Amino acid sequence: MRNYQGTLMFSAGGVLSSTKLLHIGDGRDHYDRIETLDGQPRLQYRHNEEMLTLWPDSRLARWEQREPVAEFPALPASADPRALENYELHALESDRVAGHPADVLILKPRDPHRYAQRLWADHHTGLLLRNDVLGPGGEVLESSVFTDLQIGGKPSTDAVLGPMKRLAGYRVLRLRTERAQVEAEGWQLVRPVPGFGLVSCIKRPLADTGVPVLQSVFSDGLTHVSVFIERYDVQRHKQPLATGLGATHTLMSRHGDWWFTVVGEVPMATVQQFEAMFERRR
């Protein structure tokens, strides 16, 4: 992917937020700087799988290793052919986003387990400039769009690597992440959700407690759903919760000695299917 930098605005359920992004890639290494522009200041720096998150006000720094799962502004439809097994692809009229000519595509789901998505891809590079997630009636549930964008150039990697080395005055937390297997952790997938496949499974400690949590990430080639499983704790886990903001739905529930959290940009009925997918092995 080419180098780019700009401001990305996200809207969902009447909530607006914006982020300043810098991406540098040379085909082998990838560098990212992500700065939230609303609410509590937060900066993220990524070099390949290594990620550092800084909270300047509290002088807190957190190191962790992240699995290489596709994220906006990649163009999933071109990167993963599985998407076309679950969506019908249609080309719409061309448009412009943040001053860049864009090819507009719509991906319509072949079943009710996922949402439609409308994509604006830069005509020259394929970089995703805007992404709308659409409800069953064609309404926009949430949208991510660049409001300004510069593609190309040769920004210095020191904009990312420099802050990752200068942590004087910060309290540094290092979260150890390890790859895992669902079956080896004592679970089995008994009722797969149509069109979704397991793309990542890791085990890592929760940032606030250090309690280990198993995270399994599923994808249909376009959308990702995460399932978090941890030991039930009466002090931390209260009532079950089902909530949504825009296209993102979250479900929290107790299953015996375990606490499940499922999050994804899919209908709540699909989230419930992911909750029912896991069964403890005897």
Image (cartoon, rainbow, N blue to C red):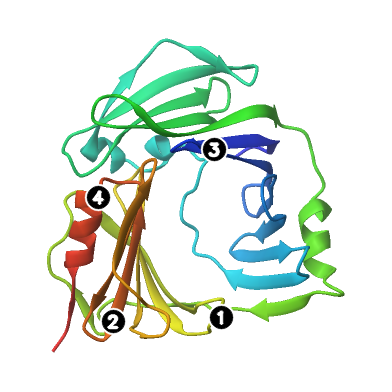
Q: Which residue was labeled with disc 3? A: 10
- Assess whether mark 4 and mark 1 are in contact (beta carbons under 8 angstroms): no
Q: Residue at x 72, y 32 (%)?
A: 152
Give the quadrant of the C terminus: bottom left
| Amino acid at pointer 1 | Arg
In this rendering, the label closer to the viewer, 2 or 1: 2
Q: Nearer the viewer, residue 172 or 241?
A: 241
Question: Is residue 167 found left or right of 44 in the rendered image?
Answer: right
Question: Is residue 22 found left or right of 89 in the rendered image?
Answer: right
Q: Position of residue 133 (x, y in %)?
A: 38, 34
Give the quadrant of the N terminus: top right
Q: Nearer the viewer, residue 133 or 2?
A: 133
| Amino acid at pointer 4 | Met
Q: Tell me the element at label 3.
A: strand
Looking at marks 4 and 2 on the same chain, the residue that comes earlier in the sequence is marked by 2
Q: Which residue was labeled with disc 4? A: 268
Q: Which residue was labeled with disc 2? A: 258
In this rendering, the label closer to the viewer, 1 or 3: 3
